[in-house]
Image (cartoon, helix red, strand yellow):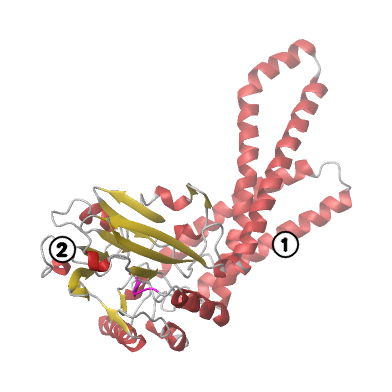
Amino acid sequence: MLTASKIHAFVFIALGVLLLIDAYTYFGLRALLRNKSVKVRRIISWIYWGINGWFILSVIVTTFVFSSSTGFHGVWYRVLAGSLFLLYVPKIFFIVFLLLEDAFRFVRAIPVGIYKLIKKDKASSVDIFQSRRKFIGQIGAVVAGIQFSGILYGITKGKYNFKIHKAEIAFKDLPKEFDGLRITQVSDIHCGSFDDREAVLHAVNMANEQGSDIMFFTGDLVNNKSDEMDEWMDVFNRFKAPMGVYSIFGNHDYGDYVSWPSPEAKAANLQKLADIHKTLGYRLMRNENTRLERNGAFIDLVGIENWGKGGFSKYGDFNKAMQGTTPGSFKILLSHDPSQWDEQVINHPEKVHLTLSGHTHGAQYGVEIGNIQISPVQFRYTHWAGLYKENDRYIYVNRGLGFIGFPGRVGIWPEITVITLRTA
């Protein structure tokens, strides 16, 4: 767990970087505003530094009154997180164009210097560069404006822009009795981040309206604490399916990201969350398996606790969860973090036909147009959104129903997955 001193040091380093971004962006704005009156430039400068100063000061004050035991939640923290993305992502896009122009100027510095010495015409070369820099700055400003608009939409509307994603997968060894089995998958609810009850109810209704035979929830019911569910019990107990609702824990469910007064308090929190799953009507699976039966045939359903590559928790025990399954049977695995599929499932001697995961959220930011998928999360996860196949095994990574950190979604919309299994 990070100590308060480490958190404070990290915040001040981060703020230093943000101030550098502010300063560089300001120099770019000055070039764009060169032809404006002194009064206009002064007003814009005051507004620019006033907004940035408010954000920096708010972060400093909040850091020193922040209690790590509360976790990242609440209206004020959502305001700060939203402001961070709204203010700085557009600036980063803007300064990329400025940096490209500065790099070009650096490369051209020597030949231009020689040109000025020969022609003795300083003014014309300076004008050329100022004109080019203004043009590049204008392009950067347009791109930054698009990003600002997109993020603003993502914070206000996009986070509840629920989408149904459908997939149909054929397997040669799926029992014919399960041909046409319809699965609804929901993941990463993060109920502590929601602020619109009607929108969330709409999502639950959308999931139920798919008329699936069975429903799976693949982890992260809360952000940090089981208490976050208190006001949402009568919403998420509405998930229904004829063959039942099955669930697993995600990395956020364990309370690893907040301080607890004792190990016993942390364990009690997890036990309360397990009880909540039961009260909601979910069959919580913790490194175990069960048989799903249909018309006299069966498939094995395996549910594992969170296991994530790198610094994420590794409570999951894949071998334990597989004990008791029938060798050669058709298997579905519920595993929150898709990195486990890469590390332990793809090449396991016992074939798992379909794995259902979540966790990545698609970074809640990116572009999906047809088969084109772009998101920063792809630099961390090989499989991060949608359906993948390797070694004759499939994984579907749900983009998540909720959000955390950045209080919005841009381009990667909240998802309800519907998968139909077919016998090939």
- Is residue 315 visible in this depiction of the protein? no
**Foreground: 32 or 24?**
32
Q: Where does the image place residue 196, in percent across and percent down from the top left?
A: 57, 79
Which of these two is toward me, 152 or 45? 152
Quadrant in which residue 120 is drawn: top right
Label 1, label 2: how far apart the Cα atoms are: 64 Å
Q: Quadrant of the C terminus?
A: bottom left
In the rendered view, would you say 274 is above or below 352?
A: below
Q: Residue at x 51, y 70 (%)?
A: 63
Task: Kindly check if marks 1 and 2 are in contact, taking CB atoms under 8 A apart as contact.
Answer: no
Q: Amino acid at mark 2?
A: Ser
> Which residue shows up at 52% across the image and 81% down it?
201
- In the image, 321 versus 137, the foreground residue is 321
Q: Residue furthest top?
A: 118
- Reading the image, the residue beneath label 2 is 329
Range of residues picked out in magenta: 212-217
Residue drawn at 39 percent across, 80 percent down: 225
Q: Nearer the viewer, mark 1 or mark 2?
A: 2
- The residue singled out by tag 1 in the image is 50
Bin the neighbour count of mark 2 within 10 Å (Cα to Cα): few under 14, some 14-19, many 20 and up: some
Judged by its main secondary structure, the magenta piece is strand
Q: Quadrant of the N terminus?
A: bottom left
Residue 42 locus on image (x, y percent):
82, 53
Give residue 139's quadrant in the image. top right
What kind of element bears circle 2? loop
Instruction: Tell me which amino acid carries mark 1.
Output: Gly
- Tell whether position 163 is magenta: no
